Every structure is written in structure tokens, then in C-alpha cells.
Amino acid sequence: MKKITKLLFFALIMKPIIFIILGLNIKNRDKLPTKGGAVIAPNHNSHLDTMVIMSLYPLSLIERIRPVGAADYFMKNKILACFSIYCLDLIPLHRDGSTSKEELFTNCHTALNNKDILILFPEGSRGKPEQMSRLKKGLFYMVKDLENVSVTPIYMEGLGTSLPRGEALFVPFVCNVSIGDPIVVFETSKQLNTELNEFFTHAIT
Amino acid sequence: MFNIAQNAQYAMLSIIILLVISTLIYIYKKRANKQKDFTELKLRIQSWWWMIAIVFFSLSISFKTAVIFFAFLSFLALKEFLSIISIRHVDRRAVFWAYLSIPLQYYWVSIGWYGMFIIFIPVYLFLLIPIRLVLIGQTDGFIRSSSLIHWAVMLTVFSISHIAYLLVLPVQNELAGAIGPVLFLLFMTQFNDVSQYVFGKMFGKHKIIPKVSPNKTWEGFLGGLVTITIISGFLAPFLTPLNTFYGFIAGFIIGISGFFGDVVISSVKRDIKIKDTGTFIPGHGGILDRLDSLLYTAPLFFHFLYYVRY
């Protein structure tokens, strides 16, 4: 059921909106990871961020692409929860401290072992329009104990103007998407975040 | 549906034949020189096939599909323009009104309300955009934003809607039909680009505006202009209500204005230091890279025709 609703949602609604109404300029599309388990670490400005990244994938792979989101936000009411589950197949993360640190990423790890590709925003929330916030450590804690999982940074520009936080009016602007080289080796969260910041700073045109 | 006047059919067929010939030349060139990379040329020709197919299809089906097609083209062009120039974040609501002008402007076209079509953007939208920006209230950059948004709409919506209005003008040349003048304008504009390029490549020596476009030469400009003027004189009676004499003048107008449309968009790109306006059309760049000359030829050709014949 989830499979079909997600597929239909992207085929009939999201992909037409992203590619026809919004429009993308994609740099280095070939660097997009197509084999799981992999993690995508994009900058976060808008709800459209997740939609754009998922739409970059062909429909045959869409089932494998799973965003990770805060449970306190995406599960806060029935409608949002339904949407998160049936259209995005979101992995909820309980960041409020109700689950122990060891169990926090269990669902993510299961998905990565299943060869899924996860989208996790290292900034945490969307922040101010078209501005980067400080990177958090969650991404590092999720991937640190896993082998063969790469982190691919993606920088998107323009979505914070199209649909910023707290606005309901969607105004289309072409979005520039730049995909970076996968980061494979890192020992500390600082190291990982330095690498990510390095990419984000240089991707800004 | 598919109720196309005879000469328009011939014109479409000829354009397809031209495209087949260029495709064959490409295949021949590729076979003759295996080392050289022809990917760019291949993408260019492929995109030409797509563009021609989409234009012919929407023109042939019905008047409505043609108007919707040009409206959509305006939307893509306006979006591209507003995306490459960095507009203030707070302007987004004014930009939304700019987008809303598209369905309205093309609605005036579809009902043939000439008076409204011709003043809606130059008068009403011109006054409305600053009002919306005043209501937003941020005065830093107010002048820049109000001029930018209006200029963008003038170029991409007002100019392009003139092509659609050609379809509404009463048919005077039965053999050319309503779409004859549209095909004439599109073909002449694109052919002008090509011949200016070819003459420039072959004889180009004296740069015409080196600061804006270093590849443009006097030889290319004049060679193209003479070619277009002559061809237009012969084609105009066939595809438009114009006779040969007025056809020459129409060609002359298209040659000169096409050149300026091209360099105006080049200046925009130079100003913001980008090479192409986008990646929408593989091998060509963005929508505006392809439409640049048409932004100038469409209104000028339209008003010449309108003045002479209507």
C-alpha cells in the first residue's frame, strides 16, 4: 500500500510540480548515489528540499529513498502523519529524548541495511530562508558505527525563496541543485561537518 | 483540429525538410571525423527536433492549445529571468502577481480584446507591482525590484503574447491562414540568428559591440540582414497578408530587432556573469537563450503588420 501511494504521489503530483512548475538546474547528477545504503546530507531551507531530492530519482528507485524527519513535527497530527507515511515513507526520529540514545537510530540502521538511501538534514531544521544554520551532530552519530555507508552532500539554492518556512504561498523559482562527492572517511563529527561545510560553502554560486 | 491552411502546411513541411538535411549533415560529419566530439551539435539538433515538434503540434491542434503553449512559454521564460537575477527575498509576493499576469494577458488574447491586451502590462501591471511592493514595505532596493519585475514581465509576457495575438488577427491571406504569420515570424527570427552566425563565421572581421558580444561582427550582422530582407520579401506574400514590398521591410525589421534582442539578453548575462540562462534546452542553454531575438522581433513585426494591414 505504502509503495503504491508513494509511487503515485511522485509520479502524478510531485515530479510534475518539481520539473515543470519549479524547474531544476542540476550540477553533477551522475554523483547522485543510486546504491544503498547511503545517506544524503542536504542543506535545509524549505519543505520542498525533500521533494526535490526524491524527485531526482527515477520512479523505479523511489521506494528506496527515505527521508528521516523529526517525529515531534511529522507525526504531530493525523493528516501530517498519514502524508509522511503514505507519500514519503518517512523514518520518524524521536529527538525529544523519549528513546534511549542506542535505540534512536534503530529504524535508520535497519533501512540502511536494507539498502535504502536515507535523506537526513544535518542542520536539523529549515532555519532562515536561504541561510545555512550550524550543522548538528546527529548525522555523525547515525552513521559512525556503520561500514560502507557514504554521505553525499547536496546543496540546493532557491527553494527558500519559493516556499520558505512559515509561508503557505508557493512562488516558483528555478532551483539550482549541486551534488557533491561522497564523504567516506571521517572519525569525528567535527571532521564530517567540516567536510560538509566545505562543500556547502563552495557550492554557493 | 488539423485544419491547417495550405501554405502553412508547405512551410511546416519545408522546415522539417531543413531539419532532416541538417540531421543528415550531422551524421555525415560524425562519420567523416570520428575523433572529434559532436555531442554538443547532437544535443542541439535533437533539441531542435523537440522544439519544432512541440511548436507545430500546439499550433496545429487548435487555437486554444496554441495560446496555452505561448502562455506556458511566457511562464518558463519569466521564471528563468526572475531566477537568474537575484531578487530580494521579500519580493516573492510581488513576483506572484507577476506570474498571475500571464493567464490574464493570454485571456485577453484569446477573446481578442486588443485594447486590454495592449495596455494591461504596460499600464496596469506597471502601476500594480510598485503598489504590491509598497504594501510589503521594505524600501531598501525598492527601485531596483519594481523596475526589474516590470521589465521581466514586459520582455517575457508582453513580448511573447504578441506571437499569440497574431493568431487572433482576422485572416486576410486565406492560403496562409491564421498560423502563417506566426510561422513566418518564428522562422525568420531563427533563420536570422543562423545567417548572422554563418556570415560572421565566414567573413567576420570587424567587431560590432566587443564589450557585450565579442563574436558579433559587422559582416555577420549585415550579411544576415541582407539575406533575411531578401528571403522575407519572397516568403511574406506566401505566409502573411503582406506584399513583396512590405515583406522586404518586415525582413529588415526582423533582421535589426533580432540582433538587438540577442545582444540585450547577452548584456543581461554579462551583467550577472553567467554563460547561459539555464539548462532547460540541452545544447542551447536556457529558454531565454533561445527566445532572445524573438523578444524583440515579435512585438515589432506584429505592430508593423498591424499598422500596414489592420
Image: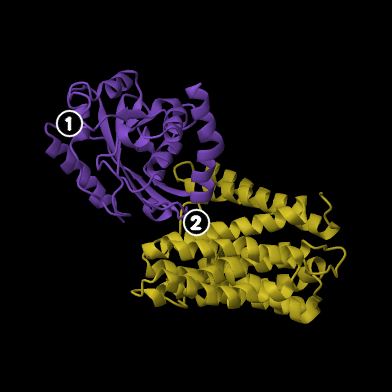
- The three-letter code of the residue at mark 1 reads Val
Mark 1: give few (<14), some (14-19) or many (20+) Cα within 10 Å. Answer: few
Give the letter of the chain under mark 1: A
Is B305 located above or below residue B39 in the figure? below
Task: Tell me the element at label 2.
Answer: loop
- Residue A78, picture quadrant: top left
- Residue B260, picture quadrant: bottom right
Furthest toward the front, the residue is A77
Relative placement, left or right, of B85 versus A192 is: right
Mark pair 1, 2: CA separation: 38 Å
Residue at point 54%, 77% (across, down): B127
Relative placement, left or right, of B153 versus B172 is: left
Is B3 located above or below residue A193 in the figure? below
Q: Which residue is mark 1?
A: A185
Residue A14 seen in the figure = yes
- The three-letter code of the residue at mark 2 reads Gly
Looking at this view, is B71 or B286 the one in front?
Answer: B71
- Percent x, y of residue B162: 67, 69
Relative placement, left or right, of B262 versus A151 is: right
How was this image coloured?
A: by chain
What is chain A's hue in the picture? purple
Task: Tell me the element at label 1.
Answer: loop
Residue B263 seen in the figure = no
Is A136 located above or below residue B270 in the figure? above
Mark 2: give few (<14), some (14-19) or many (20+) Cα within 10 Å. Answer: many
Residue B286 is marked as 2
Chain letter tied to yellow: B
